[in-house]
């Protein structure tokens, strides 16, 4: 898998990329790999969203004489991908140094952490 060019990243991931400079140097290669996975998953989820928006969340499944409605496969893949995305994001956040409790907290980091 090739890296996604910086210019093609959404605004939120560009901001997150800047925050990665705070990751200790010994953990930075891990953080870079996790970030690359996040970028790939973000693009994948965009494509899956487009497909679900175009086709709808339910699809008709036919196999032989059987025919029934089921969740669209793109929606199933999206739901799995977003779970993995959130897990990967948490792993990445956990690599960042802990704040010392001073008022210099990064607003982006606080947003990502959900205000913890």
Image (cartoon, rainbow, N blue to C red):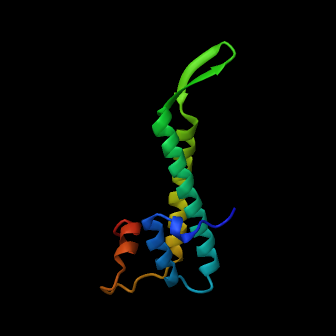
Instruction: Between residue 83 and residue 14, name the one nearer to us.
Output: 14
Residue 115 vs residue 90: left or right?
left
Q: Is residue 77 above or below residue 102?
A: above
Residue shown at 60%/65% (left/top)?
4
What is the x, y in percent for residue 84?
56, 55
Question: Does 66 appear above or below 90?
Answer: above
Q: Is residue 13 left or right of residue 74?
A: left
Q: Residue at x 45, y 81 (%)?
A: 98
Q: Nearer the viewer, residue 37 or 94?
A: 37
**Residue shown at 56% from the left, 47% from the top:** 80
State which quarter of the image contains the N terminus.
bottom right
Position of residue 2 measured from the top left corner of the image (x, y, whole percent):
68, 65
Count of residue discs: 0
Q: Can you name the residue that lies furthest to the left here?
A: 103
Direction from residue 100 to residue 1 in the image, left or right = right
Percent across and percent down for residue 72 are: 54, 33
- Against 1, is 106 above or below? below
What residue is rendered at 59% in x and 59% in y? 40
The image quadrant of residue 33 is bottom right
Q: In which image quadrant can residue 39 be found?
A: bottom right
Residue 22 x, y percent position in the rendering: 49, 84
Residue at the far front in the pictured view: 7
Name above or below for residue 44 compared with residue 31. above
Q: Quadrant of the C terminus?
A: bottom left
């Amino acid at each position: 898998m090739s890296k996604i060019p910086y210019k093609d990243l959404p605004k939120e991931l560009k901001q997150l990329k800047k925050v990665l400079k705070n990751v200790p140097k010994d953990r930075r290669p891990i953080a870079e790999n996790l970030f690359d996975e996040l970028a790939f998953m973000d693009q994948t989820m965009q494509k899956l969203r487009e497909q679900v928006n175009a086709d709808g969340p339910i699809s008709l499944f036919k196999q032989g004489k059987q025919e029934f409605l089921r969740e669209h496969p793109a929606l199933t893949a999206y739901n799995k991908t977003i779970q993995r995305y959130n897990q990967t994001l948490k792993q990445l956040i956990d690599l960042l140094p802990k704040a010392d409790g001073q008022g210099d907290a990064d607003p982006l980091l606080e947003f990502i952490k959900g205000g913890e």
